[in-house]
Image: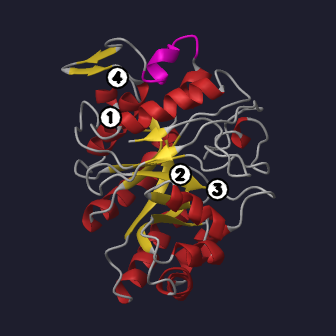
Amino acid sequence: MAAQHIISMAAMASLLVVLSAIPRGVESIGVCNGMDGDNLPQPADVVNLYKSNNIAGMRLYRPDQATLQALQGSNIYLILDVPNSDLQNIASDQSAATNWVQTNVQAYPNVAFRYIAVGNEVIPGGQAQYVLPAMNNIQSALSSAGLQNIKVSTSVSFGVVGTSYPPSAGSFSSDASSTLGPIIQFLASNGSPLLANIYPYLSYAGNSGSIDLSYALFTASGTVVQDGSYAYNNLFDAMVDALYSALESAGGPNVPVVVSESGWPSAGGTAATVSNAQTYNSNLINHVGQGTPKRPGAIETYIFAMFNEDQKQPQGIENNFGLFYPNEQPVYSISFT
């Protein structure tokens, strides 16, 4: 997730996190597996925790051989990131992309790879120029290996949207649009989604004077924003639909959005409490099956994150997005139904 967040920590341990398997193609809920901690469970134990709680999908921010091995035969579908640190090399060298795919994908034939995320939140920025060439090289490597069913994309922050209000006016920022234009054409040509990290928490924390907390937590009692024929009672839908409007304006009206991160911190910043985190994530799970006003239908979504990570930077809210503590006890009760 973006390094703009801010938190501390609170304590609550109780109850059981019950995560019920969700039928594929109807509603997909995964959980991001960050590894920025020195006290996290062993990869085999992490995968067992996913399995025992029937968590359907995982996002892994960098290849980790022990985790990939543990995922074999689990039927947990996976977003695997090409780390930002590898982008330049893979963009400039097809053989590097081929080796990456051989080492991290082909070597694990019983892992349910769904997407390769080529870079996380690098657009706009100094590495943005490497994203599309790296995507092309990874795509070529997958195709050569007969693995073209694994879709290639990149994960962007909501910061790529320059205009987001009202949602129908959504457009990409001038800084992002020049890079995203050709990427959107790549996604459209290959039937791939755009992966996007959507955090109503950040929008609320940065604008708490003008955004009502209930709008961010899915608890508003009625319409908060009326945008033509579309009525919005939660900020998540408004953000996703602003992104869809931006895609339409950029020539990608049929490119779907997969929410590759969303969550709420349980401590350390504005409105960062166990109660609010529980409310947001529970309501998110209950909501994504119905889609948005602009795009009805299930939204594939990954909650950030599986664990509180003590080494994630900057220290603060970044360390408190977990559903579980490193000792595998739940931070709060939540039901994936």
Disc 1 marks which amino acid? Asp
Say whether residue 107 is left or right of residue 7. Answer: left
Disc 2 marks which amino acid? Ile
Q: Give coordinates of residue 55: x percent, y percent.
A: 47, 55
Q: Residue at x 58, y 30 (%)?
A: 277
Q: Give coordinates of residue 110: x percent, y percent.
A: 44, 81
C-alpha separation, residue under disc 4 versus residue under disc 3: 33 Å
Earlier in the chain: of badge 4 and badge 2, it is 2
Which portion, as a residue range, is magenta?
208-218
Would you say residue 216 sits in the magenta stretch?
A: yes
Above or below, comparing residue 257 to residue 11 in the picture: below
Contact flag, marks 4 and 2 (Cβ < 8 Å) = no
Element type at marker 2? loop
Disc 4 marks which amino acid? Pro
Element type at marker 4? loop
**Which circle, 1 or 4, is nearer the viewer?**
1
Q: Quadrant of residue 238?
A: top left
Toward the left, the furthest residue is 229
The residue singled out by tag 2 in the image is 123
Element type at marker 3? loop
Q: Residue at x 74, y 52 (%)?
A: 327
Q: Quadrant of the C terminus?
A: top left
Label drawn at residue 241: 1
Earlier in the chain: of badge 2 and badge 1, it is 2
Disc 3 marks which amino acid? Gly
Earlier in the chain: of badge 1 and badge 4, it is 4
Label drawn at residue 34: 3
